[in-house]
Amino acid sequence: MSLKLHEASVRVHGAQLLRDASFEVTPGKLVGLLGPNGAGKTTAVRALLGLQPLSAGYAHLDGQPSHSLTPKQRALRVSYLPQARKLAWPIAVREAISLGRFAYGGPMGRLGPVDAAAVEDALTRCSLNGFEDRSVTSLSGGELARVHLARALASQGPALIADEPTAALDPGHSFDVLATLKSQASAGQAVLVVLHDLALAARFCDEIILLDQGKLVIQAPPREALTASTLANVYRVKASWDQDQLMLSGRI
Amino acid sequence: MKVQDHSRALILALVLLSALAIAASCLIGVTPLPLGRLMATLVGLGDPQAELIVWDIRLPRALAAFVVGMALAGSGAALQGLLRNPLAEPGVLGVSAMASLFATITIYWGFVQLSPRMLPLASIAGALLATGLLALIASRVQSVVTLVLVGVGISSLAGAFMSLLLNLAPNPFTLSDMMNWMMGSVANRSLEDLVLASPFFVAGVIAIGLAAPGLRALTLGEEAASAVGLDVGRSRIWVVLGTGLLTGAAVSVAGAVGFVGIIAPHLVRPLVGYDPTRTLVPAALLGGLVLVVADLIARLAPTGQELKLGVVAALIGAPIFIWIAVRRRMLEADQ
């Protein structure tokens, strides 16, 4: 299962959000999608999923054009965690996670024992045991982020895309989320994660895709992608590597 | 906060209470009917007077109130699930306003005299026109807010035309006819009226049923609902279509009765774990029960003229509506 964007361009109301961007996410790797605000990260993700029409180029999921997939076919291939996190009703944690199995449900949305086991597994992996019957609106930001992650894990698809899963999380919880994503990749999933924290990305990701103004800057392992000169050009920040750690020391 | 689901027990209790309320409607009235006579009549062994009271007057009236309440509350619950807003109701999309307008037009120009079926047919046509328009727009726009705004526009337009007709009403009789229709009532309904509307009720229930599982996924928001495999556009069309059919049929039977579609789902929600899919059936049952009881109050209230069902429903419903709105504001401020 691979996710592929080939020379993709997106134009919305005259604004060029993505220009000739090409990249590929392969199984077994945790890939970080990075770039300054407005670089086109979310657009790239939505284009990859077939949710955003392309003006040129193509997007493929597992060799098939993304836009030709039905929502159900797409859900069975990729678990997608969008940025919006607010739930409309105070449903129970277990039910929110069960929604990750929606595409597997029968005609009336009934879920079987396999689905229940997947939900149970996701609950445990995100340390949510004991929270099953809590309402999702009574949770802290960190707990809610874990519920959303568990929902994405529960679908057990071959690929996972998470758009800023660590937004508004403290460093400890951010580490937990990245560690979980990393273990998903080690287990063979293709994982693409949009991040803002460069040091976090450098520490966990196997590969970095760096976007700037809708264009691909580089796709490479962190050491090669996030060099001092690249970061100076793209982010206008001073950065240096100390062995395996990326340090940021201020604005240029 | 713990969330629990009691939907099975709730449905059972509501079915029993509804049956009791409908039986009470048959027993209570100007001519009291003892339980024994009612039972005999229901199995076909009653005396002619009891037969007349039960089959031609009280039972059709109670059933009409029940079916209308179910249709409006079920539509409300479905719309709230789709729009993810507990204050949504059939009125929001302008469907009931359009249905009422078409009914009013047939009264105004005297089309009702052509056939007794004109009135129901017109209000269903009005509802279908509004829903058809909405379904057309729903498949093109992504935003639910746009859809609601279009509904508000349709509602205002229908309201303006309605006021114009009232303004220009040629004589007091037409005016009073139109007022009756706008206030909502199930008095003098026959079983034939219900039979005429029944295909639309059935079609509406099927459409809502097709959309039902997806409402649960929509709790996550549209983007995430689509991500877990829901065809959001299709759900939207089924809900809009089902709501149009149910509301049009309800207006054709009872005129404009408001607030049931907001209140019943709101009361049911905490008891079914706030799940929008599980809210549907108990909310519809509670809506039916509420209107049967409201109609009983309308009949029994010691007023010179009989109260209109819509007036009683609004007197009970509007304060609860305000309470929900204020409480929702407070909850949002907390977050």
Image: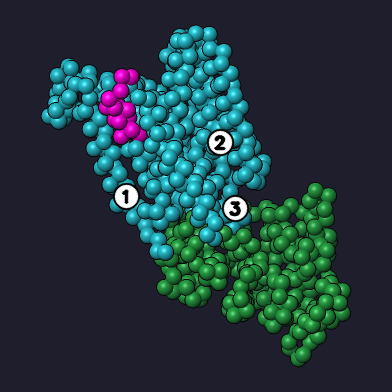
Chain colours: A green, B cyan
Q: Chain of mark 1?
A: B
Name which of mark 3 and mark 2 comes first in the sequence: 2
Report x, y in % for residue A216.
82, 68
- Rendered residue at 45%/42% (across/down): B321
Report x, y in % for residue A112.
42, 62
Q: Identify residue for label 3.
A: B222
Q: Identify residue for label 2.
A: B93
Quadrant position of the C terminus of chain A in the picture: bottom right
**Region of the chain picked out in magenta, as a range:** B291-305
The answer to whether residue A247 is seen in the rendering is yes
Name which of mark 3 and mark 1 comes first in the sequence: 1
Q: Identify residue for label 1.
A: B10
- Rendered residue at 48%/64% (across/down): A138
Nearest the viewer among B202 and B170 is: B170
Confirm or deny contact between disc 2 and disc 1 (CB under 8 A).
Answer: no
- Rendered residue at 73%/87% (across/down): A245
User: Residue B39's quadrant in the figure?
Assistant: top left
Amino acid type, label 3: Glu
Locate residue B27 relative to residue A235 in the image: left or right.
left
Name which of mark 2 and mark 1 comes first in the sequence: 1
Report x, y in % for residue B148.
60, 40
Amino acid type, label 1: Leu
Prevailing secondary structure of the magenta residues: helix
Separation (CA) of disc 2 from disc 1? 29 Å
Amino acid type, label 2: Leu
